[in-house]
């Protein structure tokens, strides 16, 4: 078929592809442990579900304003101010169907064909594809495991050109779990102060899942709020992936542009989800904090298990729920005639032989790594580490 060129510019997310393959093997009767998707395995807290039920019972089932219902936009504005020291008013908030939607709205609103977007690597799979979809040019700044996959101010400045239009990053980071400290962000801000034309897109969807202290938002630094688009949502911190609700705070002109774009694509997100979101943001946060405690325990299980595998190189991530180990030691090795040439080969070998699914680091901008999600039950993680060790120990 004569499809549009833009279809061929982008790739299917590897996270989704691996999840598909896992389901296929499970359907054949194999005991697959899935560590490929970035999805909390906890139930949505009860008070949030009750708010949604109440909305249904009260027939809150009609179209809502494109940018979100007023009480939710106000709740988000207050959340930004009290938790993040970010002064976005309610009319600077746009609610969408997930943080991914909010990021895409933003990129469509500010990036023209030929504009360069600076992306530290490793990065979340969709950043580069979104940029390419609108004709922008991804410019990658490589982070290394030795520095917890975080770039330095010097590396940032070296990547900036006259075509640089935006910088996009996540902290805590998907896929590495890295967290930029206030001091590290301040060093990046010093660089951005020299280049006022560059927008910053700060993806903070993993904000709550932070094991090292208070989350720092780059938009809270002096002079940054007028050029920073802060992305957040409910999926990770409130175990609400299927509710499909994310949001952005932005300078007024950008927020209006995102609302305009969204009005032609999807219009408003589900009114029921919006009512649930009000309860999430204004209600009891203790279920979220309990979830973070569980993730901290699981991180230790995974760290201890991976540390016992010869040849695998790991750091100790400070947030999110991922490990991003360097597996370059195993490239070129083989088992029963099957040679492991790439990280993708290694993921498929492990999936097909010991039935543990993970995602190749190639999808996240690092050919020598794989992403392991520990958003699974403790006993599953213990078993997964045993299986991974068996598979890797076989390679020679």
Image: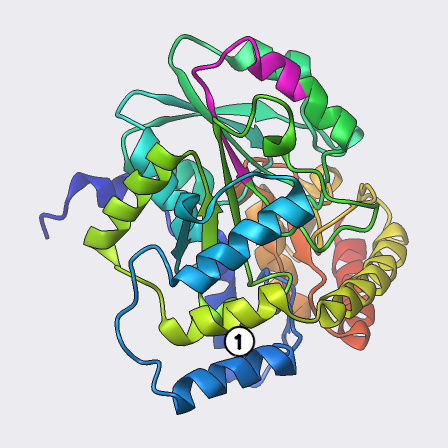
Look at the image and name its color scheme: rainbow
Quarter of image, res 71: bottom left
Q: Which one is in front, 302 or 28?
A: 302
- Of all residues, the one furthest to the left in this rendering is 2
Question: Horizontally, is 8 left or right of 203 in the view?
Answer: left
**Percent x, y for residue 243?**
47, 71
Q: Which one is in front, 216 or 362?
A: 216
Magenta-tinted stretch: 188-202
Q: Which one is in front, 130 or 367?
A: 130
Task: Please give the name of the residue rendered at 75% of the width and 61% of the height, measured from the top-left corner.
Answer: 388
Give the answer, above or below, for where 355 lies relative to 233.
below
Q: Which residue has dot 1 on it?
A: 25
Task: Please give the name of the residue rendered at 39% of the width and 46% of the height, measured from the top-left corner.
Answer: 91
Q: Is residue 261 visible?
A: yes
Question: Horizontally, is 174 left or right of 305 in the view?
Answer: left
- Of all residues, the one furthest to the bottom in this rendering is 57
Q: In what element is the residue under mark 1? A: helix
Q: Is residue 355 magenta?
A: no
**Percent x, y for residue 137?**
36, 25
Task: Please give the name of the residue rendered at 42% of the width and 43% of the height, measured from the top-left corner.
Answer: 92
Task: Please give the name of the residue rendered at 51% of the width and 45% of the height, measured from the top-left corner.
Answer: 231
Question: Horizontally, is 394 left or right of 110 in the view?
Answer: right
């Amino acid at each position: 078929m004569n499809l549009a060129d833009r279809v061929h510019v982008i790739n299917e997310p590897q996270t989704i592809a691996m999840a598909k393959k896992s389901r296929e093997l499970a359907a054949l009767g194999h005991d697959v442990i899935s560590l490929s998707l970035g999805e909390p395995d906890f139930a949505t807290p009860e008070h949030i579900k009750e708010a949604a039920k109440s909305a249904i019972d009260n027939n809150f089932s009609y179209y809502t304003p494109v940018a979100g219902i007023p009480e939710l936009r106000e709740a988000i504005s207050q959340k930004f101010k009290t938790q993040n020291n970010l002064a976005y008013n309610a009319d600077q908030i746009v609610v969408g169907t997930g943080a991914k939607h909010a990021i895409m709205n933003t990129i469509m609103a500010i990036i023209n064909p030929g504009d360069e977007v600076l992306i530290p690597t490793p990065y979340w799979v969709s950043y580069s594809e979104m940029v390419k979809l609108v004709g922008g040019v991804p410019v990658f700044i490589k982070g290394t495991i030795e520095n917890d996959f975080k770039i330095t101010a010097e590396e940032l400045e070296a990547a900036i050109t006259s075509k640089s239009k935006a910088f996009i990053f996540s902290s805590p980071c998907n896929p590495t779990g890295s967290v930029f400290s206030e001091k590290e962000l301040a060093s990046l801000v010093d660089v951005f102060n020299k280049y006022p034309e560059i927008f910053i897109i700060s993806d903070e969807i993993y904000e709550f899942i932070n094991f090292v202290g208070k989350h720092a938002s780059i938009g809270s630094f002096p002079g940054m709020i007028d050029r920073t688009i802060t992305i957040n949502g409910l999926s990770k911190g409130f175990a609400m992936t299927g509710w499909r609700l994310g949001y952005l705070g932005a300078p007024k002109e950008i927020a209006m542009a995102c609302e305009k774009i969204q009005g032609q694509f999807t219009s408003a997100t589900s009114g029921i989800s919006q009512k649930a979101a009000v309860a999430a943001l204004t209600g009891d946060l203790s279920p979220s904090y309990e979830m973070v405690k569980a993730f901290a325990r699981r991180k230790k299980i995974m760290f201890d298990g991976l540390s016992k595998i010869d040849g695998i190189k790991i750091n100790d991530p400070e947030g999110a729920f991922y490990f991003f180990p360097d597996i370059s030691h195993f490239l070129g090795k083989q088992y029963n005639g099957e040679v492991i040439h790439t990280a993708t080969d290694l993921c498929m070998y492990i999936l097909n032989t010991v039935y543990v699914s993970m995602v190749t680091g190639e999808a996240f901008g690092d050919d020598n790594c794989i992403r392991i999600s520990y958003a699974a039950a403790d006993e599953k993680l213990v078993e997964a580490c045993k299986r991974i060790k068996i598979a890797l120990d076989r390679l020679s």
